[in-house]
């Protein structure tokens, strides 16, 4: 086994978020499913942008957020994802590297523009995403560097990668390389509709090929097509080494090593925007895991990171998470 | 006199803000003057961007923020400023129009890119700005629509417009047209260094040509080259119809109509980022003024708007200011 040089490499759709406030009536008028992620083609993305309110642009992408969070905690993170050689692509690359994340995937020099997700935040803090995948669909197996995967403790894959066909191949390639090198593979289910689109493939992966699974309550229920959370939790328990099930304000449940640990959510004064809550929980959890901390503590660090990100607009931390975890006396 | 169709037209440098957290040591290492606005050429702007932390992009520009705030209050606002026909320019235009601000200045189709200001926010909430003026220097007298100016109660000009020579001409043209139509001209001094760069011209304008002056404590002292605030306040009192002097947490002082009104600041739980505090104070004040509200109430609405914008990252309101002012029972 090679010398471990990195903690986590996140692989995902490289997306810049375009965040705006909206009310429920707007979502309804636009036919958007609240809380979900809908894929849009370019003309529909432009139409929605023209109608939505004034926005804030922040680098995003599920696995990108997780990698940024891990780096903010002081972990050694890398990211693999495809942008175009345009302004949003430069912004995405800047933000990754400025956060200390290794990001060397070459940008596409032709084809669609850098991906963007229009995220509408309702007064309850919920976010509804409409994503134009753009250049992120160009990510392919050639972008997976075997040495990077082999030299990293955990390869973290977002379920959204299953939407673009080439990216799905990159996903499978990365998972294979990680296991061949004796490394761990983590998967985030990303979104209940994404689970529904790829349920068969996800089932197969969770049964064989994924060591650590992240899912929220609705996603895990969607995967097992169960009605109740307890039933879904029971189903996933023996399928993966560690399952991390997040439940918003109800906290999370960590299943692994024959144990079951409920973890409380960290209360926040005002939930401004839930974008990135799951991604940042994963940052904290993986940070703990790669330092061999006990599972409940991994969950507590995850909860703390999620609390930071939901207290402001955008899915990237606005505070150095390392300092936050230190002041909470968790490390 | 023509039928009044708008409350305020803001004219300024059209800028997208690139906001990031930084510590005092970083400012010092980069040779940046804390709290001030420094102009950078393109290579130096790129160098600073490469070194600064992960950022958030939000439409900005002093008069642009004021116009956006006025629209958020329910006022009828227009904006005049120059972007390039590039992605940041589209973002700027979208954000203006999505906020309900009339913005018809045609973009430049050649020349430098849309202006950006790298705003470094220190842990004390102070902001330090490094601006690449880009396409905003292309704003000229031809961009001033005489009908728009004549049909608007107040033409609001930012002092920063004095930096690009053509924009300064546009400024003078707009002020002249406003007065010819019997309208009011408002000026914001923008920045103490900007005042120092153009002290002579500003003196002349304040003495003859400006009806409503906005300045913070340091700017007004810089204009009159006085040491004390009281001395500066005494000097400005008889030069303009209304002088609005903001003093951060110490509140503001409104001078006008032979009266003097100290106005308290609205306390905020945590000052996250002071970017836009003065601009949004001006939104609130002008909103009140264009509705013929008493001067102290204009100041209170200004303070409330400033309090909203300093409680989050970025200089554009994240809450509908109209609702905020209503819940505070000020209107």
Image (cartoon, coloured by chain):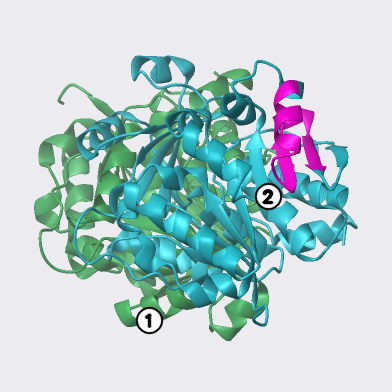
Chain colours: A cyan, B green
Apparent side of residue A308 relative to residue B67 in the rendered image (left or right): right
Percent x, y of residue A248: 70, 31
B187 and A43: which is toward the camera: A43
Q: Secondary structure at mark 2?
A: strand
The N terminus of chain B lies in which quarter of the figure?
A: top left
Residue at 56% from the left image edge and 47% from the top image edge:
A315
- Disc number lying in front (2 or 1): 2
Percent x, y of residue B137: 22, 65
Residue at 57% from the left image edge and 19% from the top image edge:
B326
The C terminus of chain B lies in which quarter of the figure?
A: top right
Q: Please say if B321 is above or below B258.
A: above
Q: Please say if A24 is above or below B108.
A: above
Q: Check residue A234 for magenta coloring.
A: yes
Q: Quadrant of residue A29?
A: top left
Pointer 2 residue: A212
Percent x, y of residue A183: 65, 66
B234 and B317: which is toward the camera: B317
Pointer 1 residue: B44
Does residue B312 show up? no
Residue range corresponding to the magenta coloring: A231-255
């Amino acid at each position: 086994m090679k010398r471990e040089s990195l903690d986590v490499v996140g692989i995902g759709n490289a997306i810049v978020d375009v965040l705006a406030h909206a009310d429920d009536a707007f979502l309804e008028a636009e036919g958007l499913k609240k809380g979900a992620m809908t894929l849009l083609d370019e003309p529909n993305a432009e139409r929605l942008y023209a109608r939505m309110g004034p926005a804030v642009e922040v680098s995003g992408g599920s696995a990108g957020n997780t990698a940024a969070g891990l780096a903010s905690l002081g972990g050694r993170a890398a990211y693999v994802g495809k942008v175009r050689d345009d302004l949003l692509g430069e912004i995405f690359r800047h933000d990754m590297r400025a956060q200390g994340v290794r990001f060397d995937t070459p940008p596409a020099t032709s084809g669609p523009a850098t991906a963007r997700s229009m995220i509408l935040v309702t007064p309850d803090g919920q976010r509804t995403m409409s994503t134009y995948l753009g250049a992120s669909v160009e990510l392919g197996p050639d972008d997976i560097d075997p040495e990077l995967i082999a030299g990293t403790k955990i390869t973290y894959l977002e379920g959204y990668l299953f939407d673009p066909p080439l990216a799905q191949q990159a996903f499978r390639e990365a998972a294979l390389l990680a296991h061949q090198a004796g490394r761990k593979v983590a998967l985030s289910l990303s979104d209940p509709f994404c689970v529904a689109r790829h349920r068969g493939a996800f089932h197969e992966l969770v049964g064989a090929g994924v060591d650590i699974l992240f899912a929220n309550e609705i996603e895990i229920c969607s995967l097992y097509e169960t009605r109740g959370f307890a039933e879904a939790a029971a189903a996933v328990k023996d399928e993966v080494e560690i399952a991390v099930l997040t439940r918003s304000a109800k906290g999370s449940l960590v299943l692994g090593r024959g144990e079951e640990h409920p973890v409380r959510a960290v209360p926040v004064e005002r939930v401004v925007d839930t974008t990135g809550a799951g991604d940042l929980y994963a940052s904290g959890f993986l940070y703990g895991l790669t330092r061999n901390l006990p599972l409940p503590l991994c969950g507590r660090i995850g909860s703390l990171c999620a609390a930071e990100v939901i207290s402001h607009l955008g899915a990237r931390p606005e505070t150095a998470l390392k300092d936050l975890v230190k002041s909470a006396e968790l490390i």
